Image (cartoon, rainbow, N blue to C red):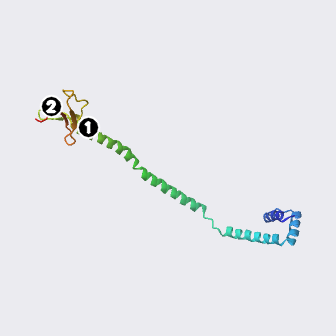
Amino acid sequence: MNCRDIEGLLSAERDGALTSGQRGVLESHLARCPACAEFRTTLSQAMEAVRIEATSVSVPDVDDEWQKLRANLNRSATGSRERRSFKPLLWIATPLAAAAMLAFTFIHSSPTIDPTGESLTTVAEAAQAEYVEPGDAKASTIVYVDKDSGWLVVWATDPGADPKK
């Protein structure tokens, strides 16, 4: 057998799965091969270190850990309920804010009534003009909306008038 086959037998020896014939082949090879004998020693030392490390690990109490986990879950659930308490407020506040904006818009855009009882148009209505028709097609016309007052101003020139007068 070669050294590669012996490595497989060393693993089987560690697991306790060798037959008496395989054990004899392994012992005779280890007596002639110092590299495989050293590998067997290194493997044994590594396995002993793993065994010692595994026995030194402390395992926590399952019941205590379960209680801690449940407490954390309950605390998380309580915190999320507290955060959710603002959602109904947002569901109510958003439509109320929109309704307030609409009411404000309607109040400030409704026509005003002068002392004589006649309805006056609002600034937005006074500034609207779809079409301005000059009296003379040759007349020069300028349409302007004053930003401060909202008035619609129309200038027109008389083409037959003397510009020097």
Point out which mark residue 74 bears. none
Identified by mark 1, the residue type is Phe
Identified by mark 2, the residue type is Glu
Nearer-the-camera pick, 2 or 136: 136
Q: Position of residue 91 (x, y in %)?
A: 38, 44
Query: Which image quarter holds the N terminus?
Result: bottom right
Disc 1: CA contacts within 10 A as few (<14), some (14-19) or many (>=20): few
Instruction: Tell me where residue 20 sits by quadrant.
Output: bottom right
Q: Position of residue 99 (x, y in %)?
A: 31, 40
Q: Position of residue 87 (x, y in %)?
A: 40, 47
Q: Is residue 14 left or right of residue 125?
A: right
Task: Look at the picture and state if 10 lies above or below 153.
Answer: below
Tell me what residue is drawn at x 57 percent, y 61 percent. 65
Task: Please give the residue where the numbered disc 1 appears in the rendered image.
Answer: 106
Q: Are marks 1 and 2 in contact (CB under 8 Å)?
A: no
Identify the element where label 1 is drawn. helix
Query: Which image quarter holds the C terminus?
Result: top left
Point out which mark residue 118 bears. 2
Identify the element where label 2 is drawn. loop
Q: Is residue 8 left or right of residue 96?
A: right
Q: Earlier in the sequence, mark 1 or mark 2?
A: 1
Task: Look at the picture and state if 159 lies above or below 1.
Answer: above
Mark pair 1, 2: CA separation: 19 Å
